[in-house]
Amino acid sequence: MQLLLILGIVFAIGTVTFAMQNNIPVTVVLGFWRYDSSLAVVLLVAVCLGALIAALVSTPSVIKGQWSAARLRRQVASLENDKTSLELRVRELEAEAERTTPAPAPQAQGAAPYVGLKALMMDHEETNPRETNPR
């Protein structure tokens, strides 16, 4: 944005310099309208009208972009608030679960660990090589 402003200022200075160096009388005719003036004034009016038209054409898209950005900023803020409240709720539920969950019962020393469906479907020796019991 600042680069465009700098380029616009440089262009304006160049236009004014060009117009002042070409200060001869000219006549502008448009239909039935006739305007006599110096070339400097005609050039400056033409540049100003061009800048005004460009500004008017680009204004709707600039306003739309600003509205969209503002809406997205509000949406991000809302989502961040929701995230914070949900994180607090998760912490509360985890703390409540820790208070209400009983301690797990200790396993007996001789109890065999669960071997799963694979042990039921296949040979017992293949699934648990630690045991040395023959069939």
Image (tube, rainbow, N blue to C red):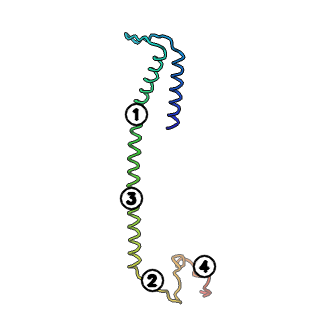
Write down the residue under mark 4: 126
Task: Identify residue type, mark 4.
Answer: Glu
- Are discs 1 and 3 less than 8 Å apart at CB? no
At mark 3, the secondary structure is helix
Q: Relative to the observer, which residue lies in front, 21 or 96? A: 21
Rate crowding at label 1 as few (under 14), some (14 to 19) or many (20 or more) other CA atoms within 10 Å.
few
Q: Quadrant of the image for the C terminus?
A: bottom right
Between the C-alphas of marks 4 and 3, the distance is 55 Å
Count of residue discs: 4
Say which residue appears at 40% left-offset and 74% top-offset. 95
Question: Residue 133's spot in the image, x, y percent?
Answer: 60, 88
Query: From the viewer's perspective, is residue 51 above or below residue 123?
Result: above
Say which quarter of the image contains residue 35: top left
Write down the residue under mark 2: 104
Say which residue appears at 39% left-offset and 56% top-offset. 79
Rate crowding at label 2 as few (under 14), some (14 to 19) or many (20 or more) other CA atoms within 10 Å.
few
At mark 1, the secondary structure is helix
Task: Identify residue type, mark 2.
Answer: Pro
Between the C-alphas of marks 1 and 2, the distance is 68 Å
Q: Which is more N-terminal, label 3 or label 1? A: 1
Write down the residue under mark 1: 59
- Are discs 3 and 2 less than 8 Å apart at CB? no
Between the C-alphas of marks 1 and 3, the distance is 33 Å
Residue 124 in the figure: left or right of residue 58:
right
Question: Residue 132's spot in the image, x, y percent?
Answer: 62, 87
